[in-house]
Image: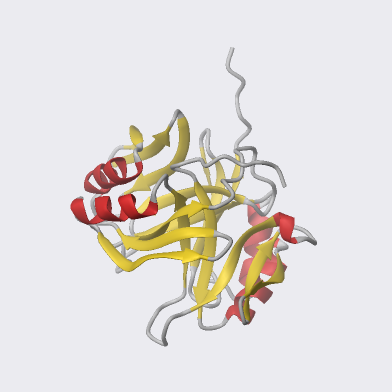
Amino acid sequence: MPNLKPIPGKFVWFEHVSKDAKKAQAFYGEVLGWQTRPFPMGPSHYDMICLGDSLDSMIGGYAAARDDRQPAHWISYLSVEDVDAAAQSVTANGGRVIDKPFDIPTVGRTVRIADPQGAELYLFKSDGGDPADGPAPSGGWVWNELHTSDPLKAIGFYESVVGYSHQSMNMGPDEVYHVLRRDGVERAGVTPLLQTGAKPSWLPYVAVSDVDATIARARRMGATIPMEPEDIPEVGRLCPLIDPTGAALAVLKPAPRTKSS
């Protein structure tokens, strides 16, 4: 294994949480080509999401809902320098620690938190460093986007807790999109666009080679498609979906990068 360095501010893991992991695994296997590989975790195992035939291609995992009332969702893991210090910063800046920091043997240390608007994620420090940056392969994670009721307060929170800076861009007459950066690298977006009745949450994006074909497969497999695929200039073609368990993510074919002169 290569020596990996920590990359604070990077989203390094994504986990699907539901009461029916098998249904989710069948869906994503057909729609995104993901494979599921069991990984020993003490007396039980953890189902890894892999892009290939080996655990070296793992990009996420499946976890069981804690009870029948917890809705299906995707949750992100965000790399930080010090989990315990970050957890203290969460409460100091108006957020909430949902579960106390804990160790994952041979993996790292983590804490589940909610930001001041209620969006949840894990802050995480890996024992082995974080995957290096690079172009997202087809089926890999390419972006993460916070949909929130108060973008500016949320941005202030993440700047204080994670060390982000941000840039705001006008995307239309009444729409502003915010990009979170750390160490000069774009890491995530923040938008006020919430579906009616939805709670603030992080929406992960998966890279695909054909958005329309992917969405067609998702429909056949029982997904709900809240809007049709659309092209965003200089971003690419994208579309959100809600899988048959009720968890939301989006797929994106990134626009070609323009070379700087």
Residue at screen point 80% across, 62% down: 53
In this view, the residue in front, 48 or 173, is 48
Q: How is the image coloured?
A: secondary structure
User: Which residue reaches farthest top?
Assistant: 261
User: Which residue reaches farthest bottom?
Assistant: 68
Q: Is residue 124 visible?
A: yes
In this view, the residue in front, 17 or 139, is 17
Q: Is residue 217 visible?
A: no
Left or right of 21, for residue 52:
right
Location of residue 202 by image quarter: bottom left
Residue 58 picture location, percent across and down = 67, 58
Residue 97 picture location, percent across and down = 29, 64
Left or right of 140, for residue 78:
left
Residue 167 picture location, percent across and down = 35, 32
Left or right of 112, for residue 19:
right
Residue at screen point 63% across, 37% down: 134
Residue at screen point 26% across, 47% down: 157
Location of residue 124 by image quarter: bottom left
